[in-house]
Structure formats: structure tokens, C-alpha cells
């Protein structure tokens, strides 16, 4: 039996480069997260507008971006759009695709949250003399966000892992670096294993943050 | 922890270790292949004229023909071969993890790779060339300083460009097709790869051209798992037969006739 010779030295040699990649993963994921939350919330709010037009437009967006693979979206933005004269930098291409993809899910999550708030709440708030925006801000959103929180958390975790797909367009993030190192030293188990551990650490940090935010939200008076 | 639970855990762990440490090269590959009744070869699908896919979805190319020839030698039937698509990055991991028996996929022989695989005698000599858009003024590696140069992740040119033109910024892709798209979309100013693939791409794409003088010529080898001398000896014997019975010359003419003047015949 040929036992596998695990090589710690390979990890040690690759560590600085892997950490550099992890830095970009954290960066692009965090920016994408914030933008995807804002976009998702805005679109969910728009879809609540009276009349069918806004709702249908938002639904069309959601269906397009939720029903196509993220990799195709990344390739369309990075390789396809330049042929139409729209050339975003590699970073912006990857970011745009990640945001549009994650925001489609966020829209649905927020919409479900908004629609889960009983209609009587609107009527009660309205009869208390609150304006539409005030109702949204002080009555509906605080309740909706609590309902949405677990599902949003899941989607943000997916976003961090999905960011590995931008390695295909030459972005030097964690997955790209892991490929770069293991394609040259062939210590696939050590290098991808280390990258996997780094993803776990990033996601654990994110879930901690989310839990802290959730605790604060639940404690705060609505 | 109860003793029963502990023994279950130990059993599970042992099974896991046994699976992980399962011998990759303990049994002779040649024997395994014969018992299986077919050869599993890693070939490229985006590397003309060595390995591509034709309009009908069939694998074609120099390396593909070599794979069929090996199948014929083993089973007297050139269809007893399963072709697995590999890239410069994943071909050696595929071999190491026994997903394929043999790599016939334009592997440049280097000292680093010799540490992890067994190479055959060289079967092709390849240097590197530069592919640029037709309108580009670039004529050599020297002029690529400050420019964006596409290379393939895991291909030898990644290091070559880093050493020979450190002022260029490299953008790395997984596949040849992606590097070509990047070049056409203005994502890169040039794409550096093996001379033969650059010449073929320049021939197939009217908006691109090959420039530069071939640099750092190195041999291609067929690769099998490290330590498998029996199999590599068999491969070498077959390659020799291909030279003596005229197969090699026939394949050379079939695939390289029109770019022959740029190539180094081994």
C-alpha cells in the first residue's frame, strides 16, 4: 500500500499567496453582499407597488438571473459584453455578475418577508396616521427583516462560495490561487484542502457577524 | 464515548484511510487496462491540431490518433479507448487520481513534472509563439512590457513569460478557448502558448495573427503514473514502432504539413 505522503511544507510555501487570494475573496464577497442586499430590498419594495407592471418587471429579472448558471452570467459580462462595446474591468465584471445573481435570490427572500407581514398591520398603521414610507420603515420592514434573516444568511454564505467562480476570468482570488499553486506543484490534496479550510473560516466569521446582527435586531424595539 | 460507538468510529476511520491510501500505482496499469478491455486516455479538446472536437462532436487530432493507435496495439481494435477531456491544469491530477491511465495531451517535459510522472521519449518539439489581433503592432516578446498577456494556468508559458518578460502583466485562463476569447474581446493584448497551437489558431481565425520567433523549444512527452516503468517502456516501444512503420510520418503530414517550416521535427 502506498500511503500518501502529506506535505506540510507545500502548504507553508503556498500560504502567503493563498492568503492574498483569500483577501480578494473577502473583498469581492463583502462588496457584492452589500450591493446584493440593497438591490434585493429595493426590487422587493418596488414589486409591492400598486399595479402589475412593476411586479412583472421584477419577476422577469428574478427569473432570468435565478434560472441561469452564475458561470454563464460571468462569461456573458466578461467575454460577451465587450463585443457589444461594454467593457467592464475583470473585477467589475465578476462583481456585477455576483451581485445580479445573489440579488435575484435576495429579492425573493425580501418579497416573501414583506408579504408575510399581515395586511392588518398596514391598515392599523395607516389609521394611526403614518405615511406610506413611514409604514414601510417603522412597521413592515422591522418585522419582514426578522422573517427574512435565516434565508438571507444562507444566501450570503452561498455568495462567498460562489465567488470562487470568478477565478475563471483571471481574478486572483482564493480558488484561482489554489489552482495556480496546485497546477505547478501537484500537491492537490494539501492546497485545495488549505483553501477549503480558508473558505470555512471566512464563512464562519460571516455567520458569527450575522448572528450578532440578528440578536441585535431581535432585541431592538421595532 | 461508549466502547461500541468508539469501535464504530475506528472502523469508519480505518475504512476512510484505506480508501484514501488505496494504491494508485500498486497494480500495473498495463494489466489493469488489459483486464478492463479499454484504455482511458486524457486528451485535449481545445488544442489544435493535437486535440480538438470536430463539428460532429468527435475527438480529433494528433494525440487522439496516437491514443487510437495504442488501443489497436493493445486490443487489435482502435476504438477500445475512452477519451477524457483534460486541460493543462488538471491533466496531471487526473492521472494521479487514476481517472485516466495515460496523458496524451501535449505535456511539455520539465524537471518539475518529472518528479510526479513518468515521461516517454519526446514525440514532438514545441517552442512558444505569440498570438495577437491582426491590427497589433507587437512583433516580439520584448514589446510586451506593460501589456496584458494571456497564458493558460498550468501551462509552461506562465513561467516563461514571468521570467522572460517580467514587465508584462499576465492574465491566466483555464482553457485555450477562453484565452482566445479574451484576446478577441480586447481583454488581453497578446496570448503566448505553444507554437503549434498558436499557428493553428492564427490559421483558423482571420482576425488574429502569429508573431515572434519561436522561443524556448522543449519536447512533448506522453505521461503515465510515477514509477510505472513497465507501462512507459511499452509506450516507448509503441512510439518506436510508429516511427519505423511510417505511422509517425503519416500523422506528421496529416496534421502539420502546412506549418511544417516553423516546426522542429524530432
Image (cartoon, grey):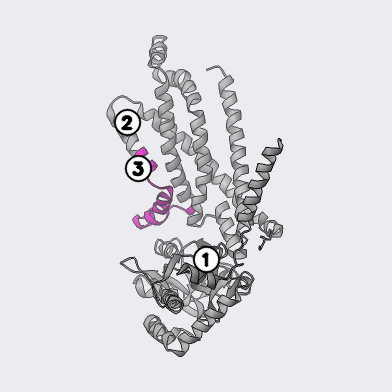
Q: Which residue is mark 1?
A: B91
The crowding category of the residue bearing disc 3, from other C-alpha atoms within 10 Å (few below 14, some 14 to 19, many at least 20), is: few
Total residue callouts: 3
Give the residue at x 71% y 38%: B3
The crowding category of the residue bearing disc 2, from other C-alpha atoms within 10 Å (few below 14, some 14 to 19, many at least 20), is: some
Give the answer, above or below, for where A155 lies relative to A16: above
Q: Which residue is mark 3?
A: A64
Q: Position of residue A149 (x, y in %)?
A: 51, 29
Apparent side of residue A38 relative to residue A181 in the rendered image (left or right): left
For label 1, the SS is: helix
Q: Position of residue B61 (x, y in %)?
A: 40, 74
B66 and A214: which is toward the camera: B66
Q: Which residue is mark 2?
A: A55
**Is residue B49 shown in magenta?**
no
Residue B29 is marked as: none
Give the answer, above or below, for where A27 lies relative to A144: below
Q: CA distance from mark 2 to mark 3?
A: 14 Å
Q: CA distance from mark 2 to mark 1?
A: 49 Å
Amino acid at each position: 500500500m502506498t500511503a500518501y505522503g502529506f506535505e506540510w511544507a507545500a502548504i507553508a510555501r503556498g500560504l502567503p499567496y493563498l492568503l492574498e487570494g483569500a483577501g480578494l475573496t473577502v473583498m469581492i464577497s463583502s462588496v457584492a453582499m452589500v450591493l446584493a442586499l440593497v438591490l434585493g430590498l429595493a426590487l422587493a419594495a418596488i414589486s409591492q407597488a400598486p399595479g402589475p407592471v412593476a411586479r412583472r418587471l421584477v419577476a422577469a429579472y428574478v427569473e432570468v438571473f435565478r434560472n441561469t448558471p452564475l458561470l454563464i452570467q460571468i462569461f456573458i459580462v466578461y467575454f460577451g459584453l465587450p463585443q457589444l462595446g461594454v467593457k467592464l474591468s475583470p473585477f467589475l465584471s465578476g462583481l456585477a455578475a455576483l451581485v445580479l445573481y445573489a440579488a435575484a435570490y435576495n429579492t425573493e427572500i425580501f418579497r416573501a418577508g414583506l408579504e408575510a407581514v399581515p395586511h392588518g398591520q398596514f391598515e392599523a398603521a395607516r389609521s394611526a396616521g403614518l405615511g406610506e414610507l413611514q409604514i414601510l420603515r417603522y412597521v413592515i420592514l422591522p418585522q419582514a427583516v426578522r422573517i427574512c434573516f435565516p434565508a438571507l444568511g444562507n444566501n450570503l454564505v452561498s455568495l462567498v462560495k460562489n465567488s470562487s467562480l470568478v477565478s475563471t476570468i483571471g481574478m486572483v482570488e482564493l480558488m484561482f490561487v489554489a489552482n495556480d499553486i496546485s497546477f505547478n506543484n501537484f500537491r492537490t490534496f494539501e492546497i485545495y484542502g488549505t483553501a477549503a479550510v480558508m473558505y470555512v473560516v471566512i464563512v464562519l466569521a460571516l455567520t458569527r457577524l450575522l448572528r450578532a446582527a440578528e440578536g441585535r435586531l431581535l432585541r431592538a424595539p421595532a | 464515548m461508549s466502547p461500541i460507538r468508539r469501535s464504530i468510529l475506528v472502523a469508519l476511520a480505518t475504512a476512510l484511510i484505506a480508501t484514501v491510501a488505496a494504491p494508485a500505482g500498486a497494480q500495473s496499469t498495463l494489466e489493469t487496462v488489459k483486464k478492463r478491455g479499454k484504455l482511458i486516455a486524457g486528451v485535449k479538446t481545445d488544442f489544435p491540431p493535437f486535440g480538438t472536437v470536430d463539428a460532429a462532436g468527435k475527438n480529433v487530432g494528433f494525440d487522439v490518433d496516437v491514443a487510437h493507435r495504442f488501443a489497436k496495439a493493445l486490443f487489435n481494435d482502435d476504438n477500445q479507448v475512452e477519451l477524457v477531456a483534460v486541460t493543462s491544469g488538471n491533466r496531471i491530477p487526473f492521472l494521479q487520481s487514476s481517472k485516466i491511465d495515460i496523458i496524451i495531451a501535449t505535456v511539455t517535459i520539465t524537471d518539475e513534472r518529472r518528479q510526479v510522472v513518468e515521461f516517454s521519449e519526446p514525440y514532438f518539439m514545441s517552442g512558444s509563439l505569440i498570438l495577437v489581433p491582426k491590427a497589433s503592432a507587437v512583433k516580439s516578446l520584448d514589446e510586451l512590457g506593460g501589456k496584458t498577456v494571456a497564458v493558460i494556468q498550468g501551462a509552461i508559458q506562465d513561467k516563461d513569460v514571468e521570467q522572460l518578460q517580467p514587465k508584462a502583466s499576465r492574465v491566466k485562463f483555464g482553457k485555450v478557448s477562453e484565452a482566445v476569447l479574451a484576446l478577441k474581446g480586447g481583454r488581453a493584448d497578446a496570448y503566448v502558448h505553444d507554437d503549434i497551437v498558436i499557428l493553428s489558431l492564427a490559421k483558423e481565425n482571420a482576425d488574429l495573427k502569429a508573431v515572434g520567433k519561436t522561443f524556448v523549444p522543449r519536447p512533448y512527452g506522453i505521461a503515465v503514473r510515477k514509477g510505472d516503468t513497465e507501462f512507459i517502456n511499452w509506450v516507448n516501444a509503441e512510439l518506436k514502432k510508429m516511427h519505423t512503420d511510417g505511422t509517425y510520418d503519416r500523422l506528421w503530414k496529416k496534421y502539420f504539413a502546412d506549418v511544417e517550416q516553423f516546426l522542429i521535427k524530432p
